[in-house]
Image (cartoon, rainbow, N blue to C red):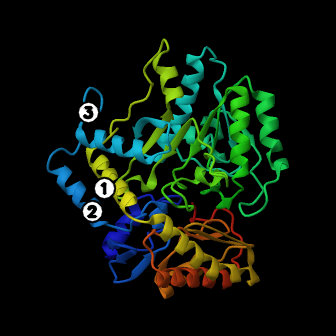
Amino acid sequence: MKKLLDFDSEHLWHPYAALKNTPARFLAKSAHGTTIETADGLKLIDAVSSWWCMAHGHNAPEIVEAIQKQSEKMCHVMFGGFTHEPAIELGEKLVNFLPEGLNKIFFADSGSIAVECAAKMAVQYQYSLGHPERCKLVALKGGYHGDTAGAMALSDPDGMHTLFRGIMPHHYFAERPNCRFDEAWNPSDFASMERVVEEHKDEIAAVICEPVFQGGNGMWLYNAGYLKALRELCDRYGILLILDEIAAGFYRTGPRFAMMHTVEENGADFVKPDIMCIGKALTGGSITMAACVASEKVAETITNSKIPAFMHGPTYMANPLACAAGIASLSLFESRDYAGEVARIEARLRANLEPLRALENAADVRVLGAIGVLELKAKPSADDILRVIRETGVWLRPFCNYVYTMPPLITTDSEIDRICEAIKMIGECEPAPVVEGEDEFHE
């Protein structure tokens, strides 16, 4: 084991970490259900769903079997010039699973690429209407959309990507919505977005945001009334609305998609985007895949223009193994009562985390669906976090001042209790001295 970890430390980069002197903390040996087992025999509850994608838990038998069966037939074939049954079947299932009217599907390699596709699609849509000058987007401060250049350019301009400003295209940003999810909607919270759009309306192709739940730059939950105002504003100026449901979709916030929090009490339809991005839980976390999904209006406008082809084409687009995994994952979403499971998890998280507001180092507690966040005034040391992980058998990966959990949707009540106890223990740790550039925990 030491030899493997030594090689890792010498040669393999890890996310948001220095190459040397930041060795992998654990050598994963296997993973099943909610548990990751390490080579030294430690069993860890995966409280963050391996970055939010393991909705059904690790190695869901139905998904493993689907990948195995597909691998015996065809692991990959280019999607240029070919199609195949797994892509068609997954497309059919998605059309039935997604909100009505969002049914033109572009399969992508990852969430970041889906966001890149959405931005390009919005610009090409405006170009098709004779507005090549509309090539900018508006995004929200505090947002996160991925790590590729185009996605970084749409993420928080003052966040973790500032080092790369020189290679990123310039877009416009509105202030983060400050009206909390569980508060009454305050229309004044929309003033910044309204001002930015009205000032630059002739340059803007689309507005992009994470609906209700801003993930990787602050774990923030904001009022769904913002999305209603945003839909009206975009319609007023002929601007497209892109919703990034990569982290929030597939029941993570409660309903099937976070946009559904905007449904009216009288049963009126919820806010729908012109383009949406999905990923992460799409394949149940088993293999990388995402999708950029357009409305008929967007797709038809591009298709009937002088440049009818959407100008993007990943090598592994609609990879058959990923499609097979996606089919199995969607079948699980369709057959299980995940809305009920998430409601159960939410109640347990609230019961356990709300009392943590009393901690001396607590700044805030936020819970929605299968998302729980303890925001600290100051973060503890990495050593203290690792000590808690080992003592509790709970894998948590705090970033900045946020200790959060987004567990698999199959996590039991007793496991939720253990996760919350670990969060409490981290919250009780002494704040660490601030050392610039020493934070390897992120997103």
Q: Position of residue 247 (x, y in %)?
A: 53, 55
Q: Which residue is mark 2?
A: 62
Q: Which residue is mark 3?
A: 83
Q: Position of residue 83 (x, y in %)?
A: 26, 33
Q: CA distance from mark 3 to mark 1?
A: 19 Å
Q: Which mark is residue 145?
A: none
SS at badge 2: helix
Question: Of label 3 and label 2, which has the lower sequence position?
Answer: 2
Tell me what residue is drawn at x 38 percent, y 35 percent.
314
In-front residue for pair 398/273: 273
Dot 3 alpha-carbon crowd within 10 angstroms: few under 14, some 14 to 19, many 20 or more: few
In the displayed structure, 156 sits above or below 352; it is: above
Q: Which residue is mark 1?
A: 328
SS at badge 3: loop
Tell me if residue 285 can be seen.
no
Amino acid bearing label 3: Thr
Tell me what residue is drawn at x 81 percent, y 50 percent.
189
